Every structure is written in structure tokens, then in C-alpha cells.
Image (cartoon, helix red, strand yellow):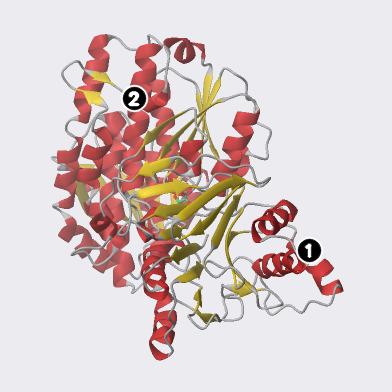
């Protein structure tokens, strides 16, 4: 996934674009570049490999000026990270310049056709194919809009592009094909902005329009023309974005991930806001468009997601089956779309996705809708594709999550599934009013419990100092703590690069216990629940083999001190909501270990915040 910014208006385009790219750098940081049309009517480009800071230094040494431009931060797909592969890319006649997010799946055949016509390629990217194809159509006399539409119709795969044409120096054209990363258009006073994500342009305007699949827009500083790829005008749907720009900044924290971990008490309050009537003991989810008929007709629920969101879905299974008595399956988006799932009109499919733009998850949604399922989503990014294609949705309302490692989106998505399960349970007659009231009341304590976990941050930092040199970690849990163990392992591996595995504790004796020795720390989630004793015996098995055990236990459990080498205490939480609390020490332990190892916590190597390509 890449970051794109475009600007046209009275400001200096380079500074607007650079500031925007900084807010998008989490989307990709293999290289960065910017193109502007200068007052002398010439196109000027600066590009460099590596992080944005390199482009910034280049611009300080060799500044650009201009009132229209486009910029890009790259997460490399085709062509290794290098200056020659950095966007923007120029067509063979030096007339058009393009930035691009997504993958042109048929780019090799298109490139071969262009090379057969004698066109020389300057890079290894699929993007350059787009630039040359545009010049071919323009050279044949086609209008710019028409050329863009023609090129997009030739491309296979999900793609989003922004184009400038030297012969129309006051115009930006942006377009979206499939589920590539979104395109947000910001409408200002006598100026227009384009960005892959809201935070890049939020300081200038809150009035936004989002491109949908197979839509394009022609922008000048004071006009917006939205059409489909056949040139039919579309009435733009404006969104007033309520996020405040400050919340998209680090503030007094060292990293976005740290800030977002500490924002969780607030995020939990925000995700409950307007959705729980504590007086009446009920849940209200207007955007879900639920009806008794629909809720009672449903025979099964499929949850589709990737990464951390998938682990949230594994927890959701416990919630929907226990509270709403709705049979639930959970599947990776990347698998779901290829194994021909059994879907019909009595199936609901729930997509869990912070970004709302994850290609594998969106492809699963497309499949579900095509087969007649009711499509729901729980999403954080406002106006994202997943939200727009759903029959009903719940916004996580967690605020921007910038750190690549997902934290507050994980905990709020669990709570949102809990809310949905309660609403469905009531409509399906699976919950007595008294039981529903108890479930609703249990929500009230969450923000405070989360705050109490954060108060012990210093202990987690101490523990990190003891274990940051480990090269392998094991996270064990049972029942609803098993997905939490999986998430703890993912947090550690993706930001510290330590090999970490989450495992169902009961499975250890079927093989993995052979791994355990004194060099393999074992994090055992052993909070007070019906599986506590089973977990204690697992801890003893690990200890008997020389393992070093870090127990995550319930406050007040003194006995566990005699079983484990280290104990992390968490406040007791209602069983079905316990993952929200139990995961937080694991987030902080991983964070501190990664910091101690000198890793780039917010922009871990090889990763991007939202994977908008397959
Ligand atoms: C989690 O920390 C990772 N950044 C990654 O696994 C992420 O959860 C996954 O890519 C799904 O993203 P989404 O929630 O935006 O769909």
C-alpha cells in the first residue's frame, strides 16, 4: 500500500504535499517523490529511495515551487525500492506524470506491447506502464479524462491513480479501480486536495468526497467533476469529517503505537458512545439496519478479516455463539475468497478491518455480496470501501490509528462485536432482558479497567529489559484467551522481529512442547476462568522442561507466584470482555521490547499499515 497526496490552489504545493506525505508515511516508506508544475510551465520532479526524510533533504538542497503537484510514498510491490522505481513516473513524451497505489496485474503483457512499439522503460514498476499508455492516447488526440478512462479499462487489478498533464497545468485527475487504497478528495476555499487517507489533508478541510470503484474526478482549484469511467457525471456525496487533526499527531508520546495503546480507555468510551442505553439496559446500533426478521432468519455468520483483525474475529466467535446463539465461522480474507464458502441469503458476512481497505478482506466481501449474503462491517476508517459496500456497519470510533501495529482498533473491534452480538441476541430472542442488562452493565467498567492496566506500564518495561534479547517466544492461552495469545505473539513479532508463536495451551503436549527450554520465554495467559487449573498444569509442564514462564494472571492470585517465574497482573474482567484487558500488557510488553531492541516501532520493516494489494 502506498501514500498519495495531490494539491491545486494558492498555496505552495511542495509544502502541502510533503506535510501530507509525512502523515501517510505509515502506508509505505521504501521511497518517496513529488512532481510539480512550476511557474515557467515546466514539470519538476524530486524522488529518492528510503524514508521521506531523504526526499525532504533533497528538497531543502534543491527546492521546488508551484501551485499544483502530486506526491507519493511507496511500499514496493513491482520493482525493488530504488530511486528509479520511486514515484512519480513520467510518460515517454514527458507530458504526463502519475502516482499510483495498487497492482496492475497484467502489467507484463502491457509492458511487452509498449516495448514492441519501441517505448523504452526507465523503471521496473507497473506504474510506468500507466504513464506511457496515457501518452499513447493523448498523442492520438484523446482528451485527458478520456485517456485516463481508456487506460483504466485496460488495467486488471485494484488501482488508484492521480495524473497531471503539462498541457492542462491547472488540472488534477484522480481515479479508482477495484478495492485499491481509497482516494479522499478534500474541498477547500479555492483549493483542492487529494489523499489516500484522511489525516494527510484534515488540517486544511473537513469537507471530503471519497472515490468509489470505477469512478474518476477532474479537479481544478475551484471545481470538481465526478464521473464514472464512461464519462457519466455522478453527484458527489460529501462527508463532514469530525476527527480533530491533533489526534492524528504523536503528542507527548515517543511513538504512535505507544500513544494509541494509551488512548484505549478513551477509545473504549468512544466506541460505546451513543450505542448503549445503560438506563434501559439495551444496545442501539442504527447503522446496522437490523430487523427482527433478518436477525431471526440468519442461520450462520462468517467473519472475514486479516492479521490482528482476524484474531479479533476469533474472539468474536465466542461472543456471537455465546450471546446471540448464532453459529459463527472465522476465516482469513485471503483464504475465504478462494475456497468457495457456502453462502446463501441466510448467511451474514462480517468484515473486521481497521483501514476498511485491506484487499483480501474486501475481495471476500465482494464474494459474499455476489453470493447473496448480508454484508456487515466493523471499520475504523471513515468513508472507507468496506464501510461503503456494507448493508450495515459499526464504526470503531477509535480515532486515527497510525502505528502499523494495530492496538486500539483490536480492542474496540472486540467491543463492537460484543455490542452487535447483544443486539442480535435480543432480536433473536436468545437473551432474557435480565441477561441483556447484565451484559450491558459489564461494559461500563471497561474503560476504568483499561486505565488500571496502563498504570503498570513501568513493570512491563522492566520485564522487557529482561527478555529483549530472546530470539523466540511462546504465547499460550485457552478458550477466549487463545486468540489473545495469538495477538500477543503477532504484536511481538511484527515490531521486534522476534520469532513468536501463539498456541492453544492444550496442544503443547502434541508436539510444540519439544521447543521449550530456558532460552524460550513462555507467556501463559492464566487469568481466573473455568480453564484456570488446566492452564496451571500447562505452566508446570513448561517449567518441568526448563522453560521460563511469564504468567498473565488475575489481581489477587497469589498462588500463581509459586508456579511462574514472573507474574503480570490484570484486573478481573467479565469473561467475554477479558481479551480487551488481557491483551493490553502484551501490547506494552511488545512495545518496550521493540524499543529496547532499537526497532522502528511505528514503521516496522517490510510492513505497511493497510495492505491494499493481494
Ligand atoms: C496488525 O498489527 C497488522 N498491522 C496487520 O495484521 C493488520 O491487522 C492487518 O493487515 C489487517 O488490517 P485491517 O484491520 O486494516 O484490515
Q: Is mark 2 within 8 Å of ligand 1?
A: no
* Image position, residue 478 (x, y; %): 38, 37
Instruction: Using the image, determine if residue 575 lies above or below residue 217.
Output: above
Report the number of discs: 2
Residue denoted by label 2: 285
In the image, 108 versus 69, the foreground residue is: 69
Q: Quadrant of residue 466?
A: bottom left
Residue 530, position in %: x, y? Answer: 30, 28
- Kindly tell me whether residue 435 is visible in this rendering: yes
Q: Residue at x 49, y 40 (%)?
A: 386
| Crowding near the residue tagged with mark 1, few <14, some 14–19, many ≥20 C-alpha atoms within 10 Å | some
Q: From this view, report whether residue 280 is shown above or below residue 479.
A: above
Residue shown at the point (52%, 59%) measured from the top left: 1
Q: Which residue is drawn at 24% across and 29% down?
A: 274
Lower sequence index among marks 1 and 2: 1
Q: Residue 419 carries which label?
A: none
Q: Which of 140 and 507 is in front in this view?
A: 140
| 38 relative position to 429: left or right | right
The picture places residue 452, in percent across and down from the top left corner, at 14, 45
- Near mark 2 (Cα within 10 A), the count class, few <14, some 14-19 or many ≥20, is some
Q: Is any part of residue 543 visible from this angle? A: no
Q: What element carries label 2?
A: loop
Residue 320 drawn above or below residue 189: above
Quadrant in the rendering for residue 418: top left
Q: Which residue lies furthest to the bottom in this view?
A: 61
The CA span between labels 1 and 2 is 47 Å
Give me the residue at 25% from left, 63% from top: 250
Q: Position of residue 604 (x, y in %)?
A: 42, 66
Q: Which of marks 1 and 2 is in front?
A: 1
The residue singled out by tag 1 in the image is: 110
User: What secondary structure is marked by label 1?
Assistant: helix
Amino acid at each position: 500500500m502506498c501514500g498519495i497526496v495531490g494539491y491545486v490552489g494558492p498555496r505552495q504545493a511542495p509544502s502541502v504535499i510533503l506535510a501530507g506525505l509525512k502523515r501517510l508515511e505509515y502506508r509505505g516508506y521504501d521511497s518517496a517523490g513529488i512532481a510539480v508544475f512550476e511557474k515557467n510551465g515546466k514539470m519538476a520532479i524530486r524522488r529518492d529511495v528510503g524514508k521521506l526524510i531523504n526526499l525532504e533533504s533533497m528538497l531543502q538542497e534543491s527546492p521546488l515551487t508551484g501551485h499544483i503537484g502530486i506526491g507519493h510514498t511507496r511500499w514496493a510491490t513491482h520493482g525493488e525500492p530504488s530511486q528509479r522505481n520511486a514515484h512519480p513516473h513520467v510518460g515517454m513524451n514527458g507530458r504526463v506524470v502519475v502516482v499510483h497505489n495498487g497492482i496492475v496485474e497484467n502489467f507484463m503483457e502491457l509492458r511487452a506491447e509498449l516495448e514492441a512499439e519501441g517505448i523504452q522503460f526507465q523503471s521496473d514498476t507497473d506504474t510506468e506502464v500507466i504513464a506511457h499508455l496515457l501518452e499513447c492516447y493523448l498523442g492520438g488526440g484523446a482528451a485527458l479524462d478520456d485517456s485516463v478512462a481508456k487506460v483504466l479499462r485496460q488495467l486488471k487489478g485494484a488501482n488508484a491513480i492521480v495524473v497531471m498533464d503539462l498541457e492542462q497545468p491547472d488540472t488534477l485527475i484522480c481515479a479508482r479501480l477495484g478495492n485499491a487504497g481509497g482516494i479522499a478528495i478534500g474541498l477547500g476555499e479555492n483549493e483542492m486536495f487529494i489523499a489516500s487517507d484522511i489525516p494527510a489533508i484534515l488540517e486544511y478541510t473537513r469537507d471530503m468526497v471519497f472515490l468509489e470503484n470505477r469512478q474518476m474526478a477532474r479537479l481544478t482549484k475551484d471545481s470538481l467533476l465526478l464521473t464514472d469511467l464512461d464519462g457519466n457525471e455522478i453527484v458527489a456525496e460529501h462527508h463532514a469529517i469530525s476527527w480533530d487533526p491533533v489526534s492524528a499527531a504523536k503528542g507527548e508520546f515517543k511513538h504512535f503505537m505507544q500513544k494509541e495503546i494509551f488512548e484505549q480507555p478513551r477509545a473504549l468510551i468512544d466506541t460505546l458512545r451513543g450505542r448503549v442505553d445503560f438506563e434501559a439496559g439495551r444496545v442501539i446500533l442504527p447503522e446496522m439496519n437490523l430487523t427482527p426478521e433478518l436477525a431471526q432468519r440468519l442461520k450462520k455468520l462468517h467473519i472475514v478479516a486479516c492479521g490482528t483483525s482476524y484474531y479479533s474475529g476469533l474472539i468474536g466467535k465466542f461472543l456471537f455463539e455465546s450471546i446471540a446463539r448464532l453459529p459463527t465461522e472465522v476465516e482469513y480474507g485471503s483464504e475465504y475468497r478462494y475456497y468457495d464458502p457456502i453462502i446463501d441469503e441466510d448467511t451474514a458476512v462480517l468484515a473486521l478491518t481497521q483501514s476498511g481497505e485491506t484487499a483480501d478482506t474486501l475481495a471476500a466481501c465482494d464474494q459474499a455480496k455476489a453470493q447473496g449474503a448480508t454484508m456487515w462491517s466493523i471499520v475504523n476508517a471513515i468513508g472507507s470501501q468496506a464501510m461503503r459496500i456494507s448493508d450495515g456497519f459499526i464504526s470503531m470510533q477509535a480515532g486515527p490509528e497510525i502505528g502499523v501495529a494495530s492496538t486500539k482498533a483490536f480492542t474496540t473491534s472486540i467491543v463492537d462485536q460484543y455490542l452487535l452480538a447483544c443486539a442480535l441476541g435480543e432480536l433473536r430472542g436468545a437473551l432474557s432482558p435480565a441477561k441483556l442488562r447484565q451484559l450491558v452493565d459489564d461494559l461500563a467498567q471497561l474503560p476504568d479497567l483499561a486505565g488500571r492496566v496502563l498504570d503498570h506500564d513501568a513493570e512491563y518495561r522492566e520485564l522487557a529489559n529482561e527478555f529483549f534479547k530472546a530470539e523466540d517466544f511462546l504465547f499460550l492461552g485457552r478458550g477466549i484467551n487463545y486468540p489473545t495469545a495469538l495477538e500477543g505473539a503477532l504484536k511481538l513479532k511484527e515490531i521486534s522481529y522476534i520469532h513468536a508463536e501463539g498456541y492453544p495451551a492444550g496442544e503443547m503436549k502434541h508436539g510444540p512442547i519439544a521447543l521449550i527450554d530456558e532460552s524460550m520465554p513462555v507467556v501463559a495467559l492464566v487469568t481466573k476462568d473455568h480453564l484456570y487449573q488446566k492452564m496451571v498444569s500447562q505452566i508446570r509442564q513448561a517449567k518441568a522442561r526448563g522453560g521460563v514462564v511469564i504468567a498473565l494472571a488475575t489481581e489477587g492470585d497469589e498462588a500463581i507466584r509459586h508456579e511462574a517465574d514472573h507474574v503480570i497482573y490484570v484486573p478481573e474482567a467479565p469473561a467475554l470482555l477479558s481479551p480487551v484487558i488481557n491483551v493490553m500488557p502484551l501490547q506494552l510488553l511488545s512495545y518496550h521490547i521493540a524499543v529496547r531492541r532499537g526497532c522502528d516501532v511505528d514503521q516496522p520493516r517490510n510492513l505497511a499499515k493497510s495492505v491494499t494489494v493481494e
